Amino acid sequence: MVALLLLFLTLPVAVFTKDVKCPEGFLHFKRTPTAKNNHTKNWCMKVSVYENVGNRDNARSVCLADNATLTIPENREEYEAISAYIRKANISEPHAIDGQISQKCKLKMFRHQRLRLEINTTRWTGDCNIKKNLFTFDDVNTDTTFALTQFEWSVPNGQGATQHDRDPKLFWVDECLKMSQTHYTGNRTGLPFVDLSWCMGVDGTDKSDWRFKYRVINSVLCGRRPL
């Protein structure tokens, strides 16, 4: 009996550990579990191709079809692995990723636009500072700290308003995160890759409008736990 017990204790751990498996089409990433990523050890990500996922509801729906959510790379290694896959699969950029300016902060931006005040999310105090709660995220299993340091431009980098005659001025702001620079093959060291897009995609934008080509997004990064 003692010999059998000793044999059991010395067997490799792998014998008793279930292999991690992601659904077909998903890439598997090992993570260091922390409070900021909901103690996630393994995460699966997939670049799903679908028309007009610049529309945030479309993007969410495409991910939901795989029982997944919008997600975002947690570190440089994940971003580079996803970029390599995108280049190999020849998927057009940019790509919708998790993250959207909170409605509270969007209203603050509109008020600043109306009063012609500077919008500076790096100097604002309170929740609307970029290091605090400027963005909301669907995915609770990813630490967004790294991604929020990877903006190509200031936040926000696209906003404006339209007005006809004496009608109310209608404000807009690019508020949904997108991932870019995945096709770049030069020096990728420290390459910033996060930008913002209009959350309605190309909906309501005429093809003759100069903004149309900047709002075309036909792929989305989705994430979920392994099977």
Image (cartoon, helix red, strand yellow):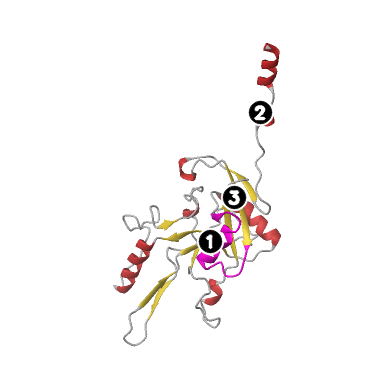
| Image: magenta residue range | 49-71
Q: Is residue 212 covered in magenta?
A: no
* Disc with the residue nearer the chain's start (2 vs 1): 2
Residue 154 seen anywhere in this rendered image of the structure: yes
| Residue identifier under label 2 | 13
Q: Secondary structure at mark 3?
A: helix
Q: Which amino acid type corresponds to the residue marked 3 in the rendered image? A: Glu
* Number of numbered labels in the structure image: 3
Foreground tag (2 vs 3): 2
Q: Secondary structure at mark 2?
A: helix
* Residue 214 sits above or below residue 128 on the image: below
Residue 180 seen anywhere in this rendered image of the structure: no
Q: Residue at x 45, y 61 (%)?
A: 100
Per the model, the C-alpha gap separating discs 2 and 1 is: 38 Å
What residue occupies the far bottom of the structure in this picture?
Answer: 165
| Residue identifier under label 1 | 60
Whether residue 145 sits left or right of residue 216 in the image: it is left
* Disc with the residue nearer the chain's start (1 vs 3): 1
Q: Nearer the viewer, residue 79 or 2?
A: 2
Q: Residues within 10 Å of mark 3 (few under 14, many from 20)?
A: some
Q: Residue at x 39, y 60 (%)?
A: 102
Q: Nearer the viewer, residue 175 or 65?
A: 65
Locate residue 174, reporting x and y percent. Answer: 45, 68
Q: Which amino acid type corresponds to the residue marked 1 in the rendered image? A: Arg
Q: Residues within 10 Å of mark 1 (few under 14, many from 20)?
A: many
